[in-house]
Structure formats: C-alpha cells, structure tokens
Amino acid sequence: MRILVTGASGFLGGHLVDGALRRGHRVRALVRPGSDAVRLRSLSGVEVVTGDLTDEGSLGRAAQGCEAVLHSAARVVDHGSRAQFEAANVTGTQRLLAAARSAGARRFVFVSSPSALMRVREGDRLGIDENTPYPQRWFNHYCETKAIAEQYVRAADGPDFTTCAVRPRGIWGPRDHAGFLPRMVDAMRAGRLPDLSGGKRVLVSLCHVDNAVDACMRAALAPAGRVGGKAYFVADREETDLWPFLAGVGALFDCPPPAPRVPLVLGRGLAAAVETGWHLRRRAAGSGSGSVSVSGGGTDAAPPLSRYMMALLTRSATYDTRAARHDLGYEAPRTRAEGLRVLRDWVTEVGGVAAWTAVQAALSGDTAPAGPAPDHTEQGNTQS
C-alpha cells in the first residue's frame, strides 16, 4: 500500500520510510520546506512532498491516495511556549487526522511518548502499563501536548478509520545526529558530562530505532478490531541501567566516563537554576519563547540542563510491553548487543565520533555545559 510518513527527513521518520520500503510498500514522505531530502529523493519507491502541519492544503495533497499514515513529526524539545507546542503537537495532529480521513486513509498510527504520562512530582515507576491514567498535571508543555494529541488520535478511531498510538522512549541508533545518545557522547568526549545519578541505580526502558519501526509497521497492519483506539508501550527487550550504559557507549568511542558524581539534591537544584537562568537570558535578549539560541549555536537550542532532563536522567521508568506483544506480535527484533555493533559500524562509516556529534557542537557552542536530553529525538523533526 501507499503510506504517508510525516517527519520523514528526521531520525525516526527516515527509518520509518526505510522500514515501509523493506516491506514492499510505497511511501509518500512529507518534509518541511528547507529540509534536507537528498537521501529520500534517492530512494526508489519514495515520493517526496513538501508541506507543513500548519498548512491544511499541503496535508490534503500529501494524504491523497494513501491507505495509511505514520505520524512521527512533532516538536519534541523541552522548551518553548505553550502556543508553539499546541500548534505543532495538537493542532497539527488534528489537521493531519482530518486530512487523512478525508483522503480515504484507513489507518493512522501516531508516534506518541511515555512522557504523555509523566507527572511533575513522582518517584521511580517500574513496569508501567497501558492502564496507567493520564495525569491531571503534566511535567511540561511537551508532555501535556503529546498526551492531548494522543487522546485526539485514539478518539478518532471508527469503523472505517482505525487509529492507534505507539509510545517508544529514548530512541537510539544509527543516523541520529541530534538525539540523547549523540548529545551524551559529545559531552563525555569533551569531559563535560557529570554523573548526575548521585550513586542511585536508574533503570529505564530505551528503544532502538529498528524496534520502534517494527512496532509502527505492525500497528499499521494489525487487524483493526485488535488495535483501534489503543496505545502501546514499545521498548527494547533489555531494561537499561542508564549510567553504566552511557559509560559503556562512551567507551566504544574512547570517551571518558561521566564524572564527577553529583549528589541528587545538588543536581536537581543545579538543573532548576540553569533552566531559570536560561529563560531569563532569552527574555533579556528579546527572544521570548521563540527559537533564537542563547548558547552560541543552533536555531532552537535547548537549555544546557533542565528539570525535565534531570528527571529523565534520575528517575527509574520502565514499561511493560505485553500489550504490544499480544496485539501487535511485537518482539523487539533488534537486541542491545546488535544495536551497539551497528551503531559503532555506522559511526565509523560517517567519519568517527567527532563527525557523529558535530551537530551537538554546533548547537551547544564553545561555552555551553553538557546538554543531555534523553527524549530529544523520539520523533522525526524537532518542529512541525
């Protein structure tokens, strides 16, 4: 069938395109004006269309003739105004839902996030499943707008238009230049990543990009009566002890491990102070909640450390994937060891760790401290 992939020039979106092609489908790849679509245009079976989630006309043209939609584009940074997040994550998703339904699409798969359930104040949470309710108060605008958009998608399910959501966390793998892993490796390489765990074991669920793609494709093809209106956690087979994992990945590329160890209370206080100072500097520079960097690089650079980042790096959060296994037949085909081997080979191909993390250097500037953001590339583009 023909599948529309949004965020196709991004990390996950690009892999979704590849996954659909491998399974024999045709792809219409939606990219924003100015996006790098060279690789996409070189692929047989891919039609590249330019459009934007703010432009209903372009969405209608993109959806025309597509049987299914894989919606991976979103604003996934952890800073910005509520209006920016609403426009990208909520209104944009509503427009795409309407366009897909009007064009006759029969399946709509929304790439959501476990952050849709993330509360402001909570401790470690292990084995979270789909019975967990949405919070009354979310951690930030990103978490809230992903939850609202997910609920719109699930509510749109009907007899002739099947909708569902998948919730991968911390997607990692080759071709990721701006996500949590290259950011961490870049910081370790420069000796700028402290161990923020405070000595605590932080257990998390991560998701290799091949596993996320497998889940999305299964959601696009599963029987409508089985998946309609549902959301699914998807993750790697292995639970991850986060800080030893980061040190191990760094060691693959001869990076020093995270150090020194920072007590949790101090780290959380530092995150709050850095985030507050970052916002004050932006206001003083007249940038408001826009996308002008204050750290010397990039056009939508994140704060070097935030409360959200700190929570992701110090709260244990693991997810039960039994529902995905039962309904989708999902088995996380890519193992941790395989994923690390493929990542190492790809980094070698692109010219080594310096070339891999060059985007991070451009975003952070010479004077910015480490900037971990484990959720930064869950979806395709960082803006829609």
Image (spheres, rainbow, N blue to C red):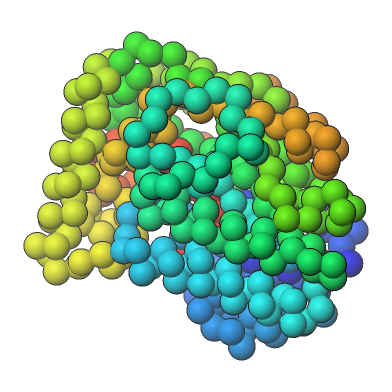
Picture coordinates of residue 93 (x, y %)?
58, 68
The image position of residue 60, as x and y in percent, is 68, 84
- Is residue 13 visible in this depiction of the protein? no
The residue positioned 38% from the left and 47% from the top of the image is 137
**Residue 39 picture quarter:** bottom right
Going by the picture, which residue comes out furthest to the bottom? 57
> Residue at the spot x=75%, y=30% of the render?
322
The answer to whether 122 is drawn above or below residue 265 in the figure is: below
Q: Is residue 83 left or right of residue 128?
A: left
Residue depicted at x 66% and y 62%: 155
Reply above or below: 50 against 288. Answer: below
Q: Nearer the viewer, residue 76 or 158?
A: 158
Q: Position of residue 272 (x, y in %)?
A: 20, 38
Look at 19% across and 32% down and name the residue there: 270
How many discs mark residues in the rendered view? 0
For residue 57, side relative to residue 4 (left or right):
left
Front position in the image: 195 or 237: 237
Residue 229 image position (x, y, % from top left): 73, 55
Q: Split into 4 quadrants, where in the image is the N terminus?
A: bottom right
Residue that sits furthest to the top in the current view: 199
Locate residue 305 relative to residue 49 in the image: left or right: left
Q: Residue furthest left?
A: 284
- Report if residue 1 is visible in the image: yes
